[in-house]
Image (spheres, rainbow, N blue to C red):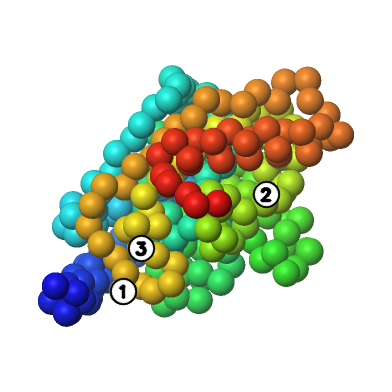
């Protein structure tokens, strides 16, 4: 059956990517108009546009967004969301899970994609980890978002996890910002994105469920800079344990 499935999957991927391009072209002028409303209000509008974009794309390609709440999620609370990172399709669930104003820390390399890159640049806080100046600038932008009562989303692994373990090691950035701004951390699990689109090939896209799990928030009240390793390891353990509840790992 593999010889039948492979051509069908290839055609499905072409259809999905073509529809993605069409939605990008439709969203682009709306995003440009939203920019005229300013950095804060305009940014919030852009995320709403992206949310509808993701819902429509999912609907037409057969991906089902499902949210699982292991604890109560307060949409009026400001958080630093942290999630695991294993696929290019991690982006749509992020805008879908945002039920409050949010900004995502994203890789600078994505701005090179025609048209989509302009939308991406308008929506995310860019970081180039190879450049210390842009890293510092992105931290200032993240803190500015928090000051404007906007939550932020960071992948603490930095890049795709290709290890076979539930998680790669975490960078300190998200946890430093959490302590410095006294903003609680909300761990998020992206459970099925690796099955929907494997990092090895853009032609591995498949329809099906795409679960998002909200874990219990982690308070940073009273913690200081010296507690960064403790907080980082605590969140790592919570997310590692959570992923093992929903997925099978051999390591």
**Image spot of residue 69 (x, y percent):** 39, 27
The residue to which callout 1 is attached is: 203
**Image spot of residue 45 (x, y percent):** 39, 46
Q: Is residue 70 above or below residue 232?
A: above
Q: Is residue 208 above or below residue 178?
A: below
**Which numbered disc, 3 or 1, marks the residue that appears first in the sequence?**
3
In which quadrant of the rendered view does residue 81 lie?
top right
In which quadrant of the rendered view does residue 146 lie?
top right
Residue nearest the observer in this picture, 164 or 153: 164
Residue at the spot 31% in from the left edge and 74% down from the top edge? 203
Relative placement, left or right, of 65 versus 89 is left
Q: Quadrant of the N terminus?
A: bottom left
The residue to which callout 2 is attached is: 170
The residue to which callout 3 is attached is: 197
- How far apart marks 1 and 2 lie (CA) works out to 29 Å
Relative placement, left or right, of 60 versus 250 is left
Q: Is residue 21 above or below residue 38?
A: below
- How far apart marks 2 and 3 lie (CA) works out to 23 Å
- How far apart marks 3 and 1 lie (CA) works out to 8 Å
């Amino acid at each position: 059956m593999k010889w039948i499935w492979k051509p069908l999957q290839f055609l499905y991927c072409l259809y999905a990517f073509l529809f993605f391009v069409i939605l990008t072209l439709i969203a682009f002028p709306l995003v440009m108009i939203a920019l005229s409303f300013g950095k804060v209000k305009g940014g919030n509008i852009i995320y709403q546009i992206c949310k509808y974009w993701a819902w429509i794309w999912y609907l037409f390609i057969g991906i089902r967004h499902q949210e699982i709440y292991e604890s109560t999620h307060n949409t009026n609370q400001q958080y630093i969301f942290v999630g695991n990172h294993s696929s290019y399709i991690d982006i749509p669930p992020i805008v879908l899970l945002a039920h409050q104003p949010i900004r995502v820390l994203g890789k600078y390399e994505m701005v090179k994609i025609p048209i989509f890159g302009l939308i991406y640049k308008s929506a995310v806080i860019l970081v180039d980890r190879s450049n210390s100046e842009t890293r510092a600038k992105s931290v200032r932008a993240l803190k500015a978002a928090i000051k404007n009562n906007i939550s932020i989303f960071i992948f603490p692994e930095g890049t795709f996890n290709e290890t076979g373990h539930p998680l790669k090691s975490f960078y300190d950035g998200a946890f430093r910002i959490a302590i410095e701004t006294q903003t609680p951390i909300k761990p998020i699990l992206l459970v099925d994105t690796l099955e929907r689109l494997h990092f090895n090939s853009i032609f591995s896209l498949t329809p099906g469920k795409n679960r998002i799990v909200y874990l219990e928030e982690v308070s940073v009240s009273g913690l200081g800079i010296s507690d960064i390793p403790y907080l980082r390891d605590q969140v790592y353990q919570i997310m590692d344990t959570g992923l093992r509840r929903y997925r099978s790992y051999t390591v």
